[in-house]
Amino acid sequence: MSTLIVVAHPDPTSLTHSVAERLVGALPSDQVELADLAAEGFDPRFTLADRHSFRVAGEYPDDVAGEIARVERADQLVLVFPVFWWSMPALLKGWIDRVFANGWAFGVGEGSGIRPGLGHLTAHLVLLAGSDAGLYDRRGYHVSVETQIGTGILDYCGIQRGLTEFLYDADAGASDADIDTVVERVAAAIRG
Ligand SMILES: Cc1cc2nc3c(=O)[nH]c(=O)nc-3n(C[C@H](O)[C@H](O)[C@H](O)COP(=O)(O)O)c2cc1C
């Protein structure tokens, strides 16, 4: 079992990072890798090289090939991110845009059907939200997260859906107990 935790936040002192780091600490050290996209300087911009990859279903740019290799080493993927405009930050969206590439994350199957490529993976989502759970319910944002990310990205690539965990009211901070609850739930799901 190997887990790749992808965190997308520029501030290493943020709540988002502390959740990701606690999750790292809750898993066996030889079975977890942290991908800190901001610190590593991952470039989320979809370039002409990515467009070429999309068209030929291969020939990935070197940085994308490196990320693909990292995801391939894992059977559990955890995305830890602050909610920006009811979805993921552009840094993480760009990682998905570029790394979940045609020919690897998905492909064209028989006829015109899509062939999912990432059936070996289970993915968990940990979202840090400024707003409260009631607002997410009232305005349909819980559903939109499941639709956009769950159905639109995970299901499309054949990824098994793991947990979706929110930490609400995150701008006011979060108690250790709340963080521990989220971290322990995800760690338990990973341990099986
Ligand atoms: C650009 C931006 C957009 C945001 N959009 C949302 C949003 O749509 N919904 C929400 O609940 N919180 C939103 N927030 C609040 C963040 O989710 C919140 O500041 C973050 O989760 C706090 O955790 P951190 O300390 O790790 O940054 C937004 C914050 C920023 C900076």
Image (tube, rainbow, N blue to C red):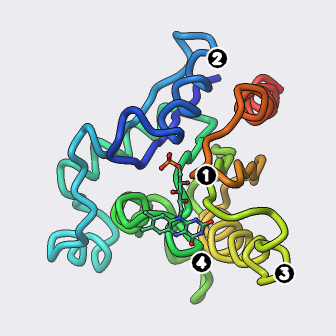
Give amino acid for label 1.
Answer: Leu
Give me the disc on residue 114.
4
Q: Residue at x 42, y 58 (%)?
A: 92
| Occupied quadrant, residue 59 | bottom left
On screen, residue 88 versus residue 170, left or right, reads left
Badge 2 is on which residue? 27
Label 4 – label 1 distance at C-alpha: 32 Å
Label 4 vs label 1, nearer the camera: 1
Badge 3 is on which residue? 138
Tag 4, which secondary structure? strand
**In the picture shown, does residue 139 fall above or below 133?**
below
Q: Is mark 1 within 8 Å of ligand 1?
A: yes
| Occupied quadrant, residue 99 | bottom left
Q: Looking at the image, tell me whether mark 4 or mark 1 is earlier in sequence order.
A: 4
Q: Looking at the image, tell me whether mark 2 or mark 4 is earlier in sequence order.
A: 2
Badge 1 is on which residue? 128
